[in-house]
Amino acid sequence: MFRWIKRVWQGSDPVEFESGFGMAESVERLKAATRRSVFSALAQQEAVGNVKASHVSLQRVIPMVGNSFKPFFRGHFLEEGGKVILTGRFTMLWLVKVFMGFWFGCIACFIVSTLLAAAIHPHQAGAALLFGLGMMAAGLGITGLGQWFARNDAAWLSNVIQRALHTPSLQSAPAGATTGSDLSPLRSLTAMDVVAAALALVGLMSLGLAIAGVPSAYNRFGWAHTDFNDSMSRYCGVAYAALLWVLAYGIHRRLLLAWRAGLVFLTACWIYSLARISTDASMPRGDTSVILFGVLSFLVMIYWGRWWYAQRVHFHR
């Protein structure tokens, strides 16, 4: 347990990648093989980060997949015996380490204080002690699960670095890691399956609400369901569900028509949200919140529209 905690906190053992080029060319080659911004990984996974001779920081970015516990490669270039070597280690982001240290530190203090209280009131501290142990176990479990999901990241980054530096040997990869040239293509494509599943689920919910006759269960004044105005509105709900299912099927099959329909769908959703808030009788006219909502929703639409536009590479026909 303590060895695992130390490895999580410290990271992997130091690794080295020997380059077949000079210092300046090695830096440029690795910089060309990676990206500087996470927005460059909208369509497919990329190695993203900063590349300088004195400091290299790289992470594996997969579209629509976030993991705070994934390993970053942190290192620097140096020259030894006429050879250029990139040395460093795979470790979590320092901010995550600080947060987890604060989390476990607070829980440990809570457990210790509970044990002291149990010495005075043994019958009153049992539940608090179980709560503290449960929170400690939850933190360890979340950390372990996050690292399990990112178990191939170090090998994948190693492969990117080795190909950039033209090093055929894979001996510098971390112990236990597998070469990852073919580990990730499937994971970058599953983003479309997630989108298709989400649309199908929303369609199912829309159908259920249409059958139940309840289009909305929440308004700005609190939880309160409303009813459809007429039967035609319920038919529109059924049609909307069918439309979502057709779109989900097209995305699952990677049809080009579905990709184009996705752009139309995003735009229509934005226009509909603007129309709803503009015609909401409970919203004061001339309220700056309406303008603020419009601007923020437009920025959100631009972000997702840009992301969806980048998915064009996954569609055909």
Image: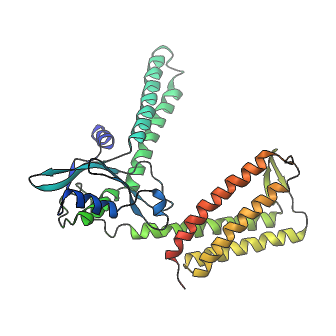
Q: Residue furthest left?
A: 81
Colouring rule applied to residues? rainbow
Which residue is painted at 68% across and 70% down in the image?
265
Residue 205 at x, y percent in the picture: 71, 64
Q: Residue furthest top?
A: 120
**Could you tell me which quadrant the C terminus lies in?**
bottom right
Q: Nearer the viewer, residue 77 or 179?
A: 77
Which residue is painted at 43% across and 66% down in the image?
187
The count of marks equals 0
Tell me if 10 is positioned left or right of 70 in this view: left
Q: Quadrant of residue 156?
A: bottom left
Residue 25 at x, y percent in the picture: 23, 61
Q: Nearer the viewer, residue 297 or 251?
A: 297
Q: Residue furthest front?
A: 24
Tell me if 102 is positioned left or right of 181 in this view: right
Q: Residue furthest bottom?
A: 317
Q: Nearer the viewer, residue 294 or 128?
A: 294
Q: Nearer the viewer, residue 143 or 316?
A: 316
**Could you tell me which quadrant the N terminus lies in?**
top left
**Residue 251 in the image: above or below residue 299:** below
Which residue is painted at 85% across and 53% down in the image?
280
Tell me if 312 is positioned left or right of 246 in this view: left
**Residue 285 in the image: above or below residue 204:** above
Residue 47 at x, y percent in the picture: 37, 60
Tell me if 272 is positioned left or right of 15 in this view: right
Residue 173 at x, y percent in the picture: 23, 57
